[in-house]
Image (tube, helix red, strand yellow):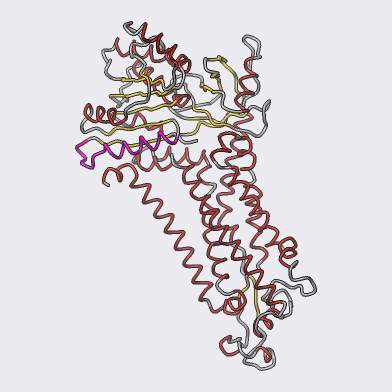
Amino acid sequence: MGNWIINNGFTAVMLVVWMGINIFLFVWFYLFYDRGDQFYYTRHLLGSALPWARAPAAVLNFNCMLILLPVCRNLLSLIRGSFVCCSRTMRKQLDKNLSFHKLVAYMIALMTAVHTIAHLLNLEWFTNSRQGVYDKLSTALSSLEDAGNTTYLNPVRIKDLDPQQIPTYFAFTTIAGLTGVVITLALILIITSSMEVIRRSYFEVFWYTHHLFIIFFAGLVFHGAGRIVRSQQRTDPPHNFTFCKDRSDEWGRIPECPIPQFAGGFPQTWMWVIGPMILYVCERLLRFIRYMQTVRYRKIVMRPSKVLELQMVKSGFKMEVGQYVFLNCPAISQLEWHPFTMTSAPEEDFFTVHIRSAGDWTDKLIDIMQQLPEGAQGPKMGVDGPFGTASEDVFDYEVSMLVGAGIGVTPFASILKSIWYKFKESNPKLRTRKIYFYWLCRETHAFEWFADLLQVLEREMEERGMGDFLTYKLYLTGWDQTHANHVMVHFDEDTDVITGLRQKTQYGRPLWDKEFEQVRKENPMSVVGTFLCGPAMLAKVLAKKCAKYSDVDPRKTKFYFNKENF
């Protein structure tokens, strides 16, 4: 349990606080509408569906306030920069921004479902009360005249329409009904298109439907303007419902029972969401400004395994290791922006991205670049960023484990290049004394574009007598018999047959228990940062290993897990 707390304790506290606020809001507003005297007559018409509709609405306001903040990447980068002097635990929470974004979205979906079902029941009971189906008091309350838009309680004002058609009429002719339909449809499309299978296979569908959030928030702001949930107002003389509820025939005829007055509550949703909406608009304006800045291609290289390397120059561009940018190519799409980790080092006067063929957008970009004449500039490219990631903290640890899978090696290319420059300049600020690097690939060609960097680092470390600084292991997870035979023939050579490196490529997957045990043994009393850029399944494995091999004793080894998120 103690090991788990080391890696997840603060995150658990944050989630408990978030859930606690949700529970508090739900219970508070449920009791407010279930016990409040001003809603006695409203509850008589609607029963318990009233608090079941209003309590989720309060939770929705809170979560709709939060949903945009985790995707305000410039804001997160600013906060990350302000936490440089703070603990790494605080900064780690920012790396889980998309996980929190999804969690908030799940809460919004759940509360929307409860809110919608409760209001469908409310509409049924409003309609029946208007038709005189229920008791005398319900009929009297539903028959109150609309004088100055204050005296009525039942928002269903139609009587001369087929009762079966009233809910549909209400849904498409009132502010609350129409905006509710639009909000619900937009949310359904956003959630369904966010499923992993769609996001991975049809990213463009995910990208475009996710922008329905604009319609969602517009409808949300105006939804409360319908004021269909109404409460009793104070009158002079006062209308005492405990005395007057059984005397509806005498309302307005005796001084003790004046006609009750009702009014809808002031819309509050806009007050919850206006701040995040303004922040997000500023975020998009900043993106537009960056898009308009000129980006010049320094070099365009087609690497093996359909990996495109772009070296670009942009005025005033400054980066840190492991950061990423969003790229937009108007020749392909004016609206689509895609994230790519930079493989260059901060010490270089340009920035580099490696783009693997992984969908329609990347395929089209690679096709465009392959058709360019030798030495020609590529199409206009918009660049937004850079944005911070977990890998920025790699030099805050004495010991780091870097794990990349496939193209997931890109942030570590930036880190290893930066280390090379720091050694070259004898940078005294480098506190990292040991790095373990693991790269898992399915095919041999994927190693080729990165092997040159590792060869340079090998030579640099040996020349400086620091051969133990970097331990790297390359794993090939896919091969055939022809390849295996070729490796066997050249097994006795000093360098690897695939990469040309002195460290031989290993076949299969790492035995993580063995690797973590070795790191712990070689680095007693050290804080080890474990960084992953790879699939979710591997993340779960490494997170468990970090918890398993961490020791609560401050004098022993601790592993902190960090994962790249886009």
> What secondary structure is the stretch in magenta mostly built from?
helix
| Residue 172 drawn above or below residue 385 | below
Q: Quadrant of residue 183?
A: bottom right
Is residue 311 visible in the rendered structure shown here? Answer: no
**Residue 299 quadrant:** top right
What's the magenta region? 536-556
Query: Which residue shows up at 65% across the image and 34% down it?
Result: 335
Left/right of residue 26 with respect to residue 300 in the rendered view:
left
Quadrant location of residue 482?
top left
Return the x and y of residue 520 as percentages of the image width and height. Answer: 24, 31
Left or right of residue 113: residue 147: right
Q: Is residue 501 above or below residue 31?
A: above
> Which residue: 56% across, 61% down?
114
Q: Residue lying farthest right?
A: 160
How far from the left and from the top, in percent, is residue 343? 47, 22
Please tell me which residue lies in front, 46 or 216.
Answer: 46
Question: Of residues 181 and 38, which is closer to you in this image?
Answer: 181
- Asked if residue 537 is among those painted magenta in the image, a careful observer would answer yes
Farthest residue in the bottom direction?
254
Please tell me which residue is depicted at 67% across the width and 57% down the height of the picture.
181
Residue lying at 70% horizontally and 59% vertically, measured from the top left: 178
Residue 158 locus on image (x, y percent): 76, 72
Q: Is residue 74 above or below residue 49?
A: above
270 in magenta: no
In percent of width and height, residue 479 lies at 44, 18
Outermost front residue: 481
Does 294 sit left or right of 536 as displayed?
A: right
Could you tell whether 158 is left or right of 408 in the image?
A: right
247 vs 164, nearest the viewer: 164
Asked if residue 563 can be seen in this view, the reply is yes
In depth, the one of 36 and 249 nearer the eye is 249
